[in-house]
């Protein structure tokens, strides 16, 4: 019997091969359909997670800026308001500042140099650690944006951080005009600024529907910084105080997983909405 089996050289018939091939194609089609569906779902879930992360980052940046609106500023902290845009005013766009508790003695001007250096004791180590050598700063006297020394013709009003000592804590600044009596006092604020920026910076938030439906942050009319893309809706609403100044900004931001729905309509376009009510602290 074994010999008969070994001597049997017959192969598969054509119908058998066709049936086997058809079965394999059906199986492979099912496997590929499951694979492609899983891949599409994984991509949408990843996109959805990215949407949530981008919205949270954008809302976090916006919240920090709104809370600093009106910092050492005379007048309204938030202006030019609409449903899709507003402008906030602050002397501290970097949100880095330190309160001076001891201005120290003014050093004697050195006639051989143009500038002098001063060291200020500040309120806390955490405030001192907000600064790094090379940062540009202004010294501003609350409650408004008055700058000691501004009444002296030619006096420098923007200084460089030369050293930081959190153990004291203290900040050393250079770039003071020799021979100028700035008359600093306890309570004056050291505020980090951008080189060439005005005393009061304006930060504009706006929804730009073209080309990427984005939320933009614009500092002093500069290049827009895109905080989030692929938004389907941005809405700002405002609560005013008795003087008509904005004291709360209510924010609604909605983002989508992709600019267009799934072409096969197998997975619906997913959206995520974040809401927040942000109080203006410096009013």
Image (tube, grey):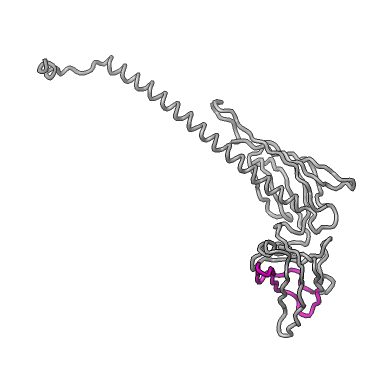
Query: Residue 145: image x %, image y %?
Result: 82, 62
For image coordinates 26% across by 16% down, the residue present is 14
Q: Is residue 170 above or below residue 77?
A: below
Q: Nearer the viewer, residue 129 or 64?
A: 129
Residue 59 coordinates in the image, percent (x, y): 68, 45
Q: Is residue 201 above or below residue 79?
A: below
Horizontal side of 62 relative to 14 (left or right) equals: right
Going by the picture, which residue comes out furthest to the left?
A: 3
Q: How many marks?
A: 0
- Magenta range is 154-182
Q: Residue at x 71, y 48 (%)?
A: 62
Q: Magenta segment: does it hold 155?
A: yes
97 left or right of 146 in image: left
Depicted 70 relative to depicted 196: above or below:
above
Quadrant position of residue 271:
top right
Residue 220 location in percent, x, y?
74, 56
In which quadrant of the rendered view does residue 70 lie? bottom right
Residue at 77% x, 59% y is: 91
Identify the image quadrant of the N terminus: top left
Asked whether 55 falls inside the magenta stretch, the response is no
Residue lying at the far right in this picture: please name it.
Answer: 242
Whether residue 246 sits left or right of residue 197 in the image: it is right
> Which residue is drawn at the image coordinates 72% and 66% (left, top)?
137
């Amino acid at each position: 019997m074994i010999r008969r089996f070994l001597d049997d050289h017959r192969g598969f018939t054509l119908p058998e091969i066709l049936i086997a091939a058809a079965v394999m194609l059906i199986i492979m089609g099912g496997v590929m359909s499951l694979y492609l569906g899983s891949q599409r779902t994984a991509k949408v879930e990843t996109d959805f997670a990215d949407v949530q992360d981008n919205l949270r980052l954008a809302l976090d940046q916006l919240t920090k800026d709104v809370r600093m609106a009106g910092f050492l500023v005379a007048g309204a902290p938030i202006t030019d308001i609409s449903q899709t845009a507003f402008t906030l005013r602050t002397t501290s766009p970097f949100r880095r500042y330190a309160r001076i508790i001891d201005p120290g003695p003014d050093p004697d001007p050195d006639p051989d140099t143009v500038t002098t250096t001063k060291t200020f004791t500040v309120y806390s180590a955490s405030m001192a650690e907000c600064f790094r050598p090379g940062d540009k700063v202004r010294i501003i006297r609350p409650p408004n944006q008055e700058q000691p020394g501004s009444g002296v013709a030619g006096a420098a009003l923007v200084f460089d951080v030369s050293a930081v000592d959190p153990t004291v804590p203290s900040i050393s600044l250079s770039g003071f005009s020799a021979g100028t009596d700035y008359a600093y006092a306890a309570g004056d604020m050291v505020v980090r600024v951008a080189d060439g920026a005005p005393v009061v910076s304006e930060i504009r938030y706006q929804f730009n529907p073209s080309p990427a439906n984005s939320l933009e942050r614009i500092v002093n009319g500069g290049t827009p910084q895109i905080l989030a893309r692929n938004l389907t809706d941005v809405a700002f609403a405002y609560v005013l105080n008795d003087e008509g100044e904005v004291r709360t900004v209510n924010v609604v931001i909605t983002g989508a997983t992709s600019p267009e729905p799934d072409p096969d309509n197998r997975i619906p376009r997913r959206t995520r909405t974040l809401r927040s009510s942000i109080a203006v602290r410096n009013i």
